[in-house]
Amino acid sequence: MSETLRFPDQRPTEYIKLDGEPIFNASKHLQLENPDKVVSLQALGYSSDDIKTCPSDFGVSSAFRILSDEGLAIIRDICLKMYDNRNISVGTGVNRLGSYVRGAGYRSKFIKDFCDSPELAQHLSAMAGTKLARHSVPAVACGVNYAPEDLRRAVDSWHTDSVAYDIVMMLSDPHTLDGGEFQYFHGTKTEGQDILGISGEEGIDTELPEDRIVTVPFPAAGYGFMQQGNMIFHRARKLNKRAERMTMIPSFVVVPAHVDDGTNSVNMAGWDDPGLPAELTRHEAWRAAARLGQLVDTVSLHDSPKRLVEDMDKALAPLLAYRDRLAKDIN
Ligand SMILES: [Fe+2]
């Protein structure tokens, strides 16, 4: 049984379900290889105290093969079909991203099953140094980014992610692209944010010093890299020439559910994708229930009232922070 939260039975009405898809088969559609290079958080300048708050020291990898030729052809076809039902075109709001699909798993069972694949999770877990499973928030479990119609705009400007681990998978032939490179800042996120004069997770489209920017090359479509995205300050540059540039960004949670995970529901509460408030509520309730379960198992009759209050606060804090953020919107 999967260790992550099951996918919801319902679907936001704005999302159109694709029919007649092939059935996902890991042995046919995946071709998992290892990256040549992994950069740790420590190598990026994070202190041991910073790293202690993260599930692992994994920072960012080079691109490695993920999809077989057949898997790539199917996913490309699905993403081209979903383009007309992308989030921006259904009135779900413009944000940092130019053009994107969130919650691809609602539209495509093939993509849902790909993101849910235990083979993929196992492969990435070994690389990340912590146990990962498909993200419990469907909006981010499988996102797709398209190049914006406006060439002057970055595909995605400098930011960190609201989830801890994600892969960025190239679905277009990278050799046909002029511009559109994926880049990260070789340093800590606060250093990068300080240089740009921003705070928080959302990006700004300005320049960082050239010698601190690393471009992640994609050898071909079907390759992707993994990052601890909430710790890596990154962007996708604008295209110099109009071209098809599609990437898929599957995200992952750290399991078991009682352990700390970098998912930032408070930030995601500001996005306006359909169903997202309920998705985040499910996610936070799931994690809080698991933490309370741990508390039931570990509480001692010898614990002081101070310790008991602290333990209860710790178990409930992320759920309540999200609850308070959501409550602000209704007042
Ligand atoms: Fe990102």
Image (tube, grey):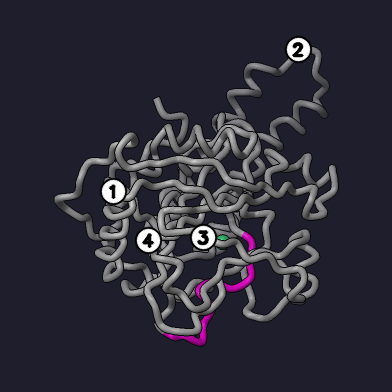
Q: Which residues are magenta?
A: 150-160
Q: Give the CA distance from mark 3 to mark 2.
A: 56 Å
Q: Callout 4 environment at 10 Å: few (<14), some (14 to 19), or many (20+)? A: many
Identify which residue is drawn at 30% across, 56% down: 12
x, y (%) of residue 94?
Answer: 45, 76
x, y (%) of residue 226?
Answer: 57, 49
Q: Earlier in the sequence, mark 3 or mark 2?
A: 3
- The reply to whether the residue tagged 3 has its Cβ within 8 angstroms of ligand 1 is no
Q: Is residue 247 above or below residue 141?
A: below
The amino acid type found where label 2 is placed reads Leu
Q: Which quarter of the frame holds ligand 1?
A: bottom right
On whether residue 97 falls in the magenta region, the answer is: no
Q: Is residue 100 above or below residue 43?
A: below
- The reply to whether the residue tagged 2 has its Cβ within 8 angstroms of ligand 1 is no
Residue 323 at least partly seen: no
The amino acid type found where label 1 is placed reads Glu
Q: Callout 1 environment at 10 Å: few (<14), some (14 to 19), or many (20+)? A: some
